[in-house]
Amino acid sequence: MKIIMVVLNNFTHDARVHKEAKTLASAGYDVTVFALWQEGLEKYEKRSGYHIKRLQVYARHKQGGLLTPLLKYISFVVQMWKQTARQSIQAYHAHDEKPLPLTWLLARRDKASLIYDAHEFETGRHFDNSRLSGIYHRMWAWPERLFIRKADAVITVSKSIAGQLSLLYRISQPTVIMNCPEKQVVQKPISLHRKLGIPSNYKIVMYQGGVTKGRGIEQFLEAIQLLPNVAGIVLGNGPLLTTLRSQVREGKWQHVFLPGRVPLNDLLNYTSAADIGVVLTQNTCLNHYYSLPNKLFEYMQAGIPIVGSDLQEIARIIQEYKVGATVNPDDPKDIANALRYLLDNPKQYAQIKINTISAATIFNWENESIKLLQIYQKLDS
């Protein structure tokens, strides 16, 4: 069975797509991921048994103009049509809603199956920082609205989003495949105290992931200011990183360290060296409210307790499996109190640490991938 996966990004750090493609390739399927090319990237790669093809899109219209995204999309469609023509393709797998119109068109041409993988709750997004936010909000999810019912299988990342998609579009309950990491073993823990110059008597609390608005990062750093002998680490990259580094240099944040992004292969070695991991997604939109960030499961693999937002999906996991504490992500004092409680109660901390290690045997890609294989086995039968 030949499977074409489509993403509208450069496919450099998309762990979910990589894991799905790797799983299907390991099961004997012929998998190719089509993505966008940019300078510095290979146009053709082979990785973990599957192929990657990055297409160079063209837009003669002035860069930054309102028509540029549409013209680039059309360019991508034309190239995809040519690249996949006269091949025996049995399935097209759209990652997120933007490739849906294209994959539906190609699947219809080839009489192939269509799989829609909803990484986000698209109708619940917000665009507050855009001057065209109203237009974006009305138009952003139109590919999903038009084509989701035409998919042979729908996949998403949390129970709440699955329920919302089912109600919103009157479709069967989508299959929930959570964005869990593969089972991992700490190979060589990083001495964060030595590497970052943190005093040896300080406990370490870590945020890992995109350094952007809506993740409670600034509230986390404010909470660190309220805790003696506790250091805060923000591990990742994003638009807020430059601002935060300037604020550290100016003295706004004490005992805060911003090393940036680390290689994916080293991530667990960094995370496992922390005492607590935080996932403080803020309730800025329904997409956040229903989200189930992969960092939650990555902390479990690292075996560290979690302080997380009191949002529906995050709180459900933390409370049901007793792997940490839930807080109001907008309240630095609430965050600080939860951190202080865990760090000042060794017996409770030790039990939660045991719980996270136990939960990691449940929330891992080896378990989640079974559901993906079942979908394709059914389509292939």
Image (cartoon, helix red, strand yellow):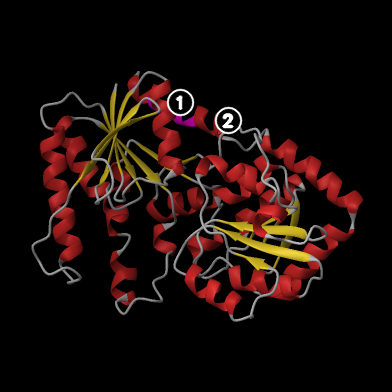
Q: Amino acid at mark 2?
A: Asn
Image quadrant occupied by the N terminus: top left
In percent of width and height, residue 315 lies at 67, 56
Between 10 and 315, the one lying in front of the other is 10
Label 2 neighbourhood size at 10 Å, few (<14), some (14-19), many (20+)?
A: some
Mark closer to the chain start, 2 or 1: 2
Q: How many callouts does the rendering have?
A: 2
Q: Which residue is mark 2?
A: 367
**Residue at figure coordinates x 38%, y 52% from the top left:** 169
Q: In the figure, 359 relative to 255: above or below?
A: above
Q: Amino acid at mark 1?
A: Gln
Residue 381 lies in the magenta-colored region: no
Q: Which residue is mark 1?
A: 374
Between 45 and 177, the one lying in front of the other is 45
- Element type where label 2 sits in the image: helix
Residue 191 located left or right of residue 340: left
In percent of width and height, residue 20 lies at 43, 34
Q: In the figure, 31 relative to 118: above or below?
A: above
Residue 163 located left or right of residue 26: right
Q: Nearer the viewer, mark 2 or mark 1?
A: 2
**Residue at the left extreme, as displayed:** 60
Specify start and end residues of the magenta stretch as a single range: 371-376
Q: In the figure, 159 relative to 126: above or below?
A: above
Query: How many angstroms separate mark 2 from mark 1 (CA)?
Result: 12 Å
Q: Of helix, strand and loop, which mostly describes the magenta segment? A: helix
**Residue at figure coordinates x 79%, y 45% from the top left:** 353
Between 276 and 95, the one lying in front of the other is 276
Image quadrant occupied by the C terminus: top left
Residue 52 located left or right of residue 359: left
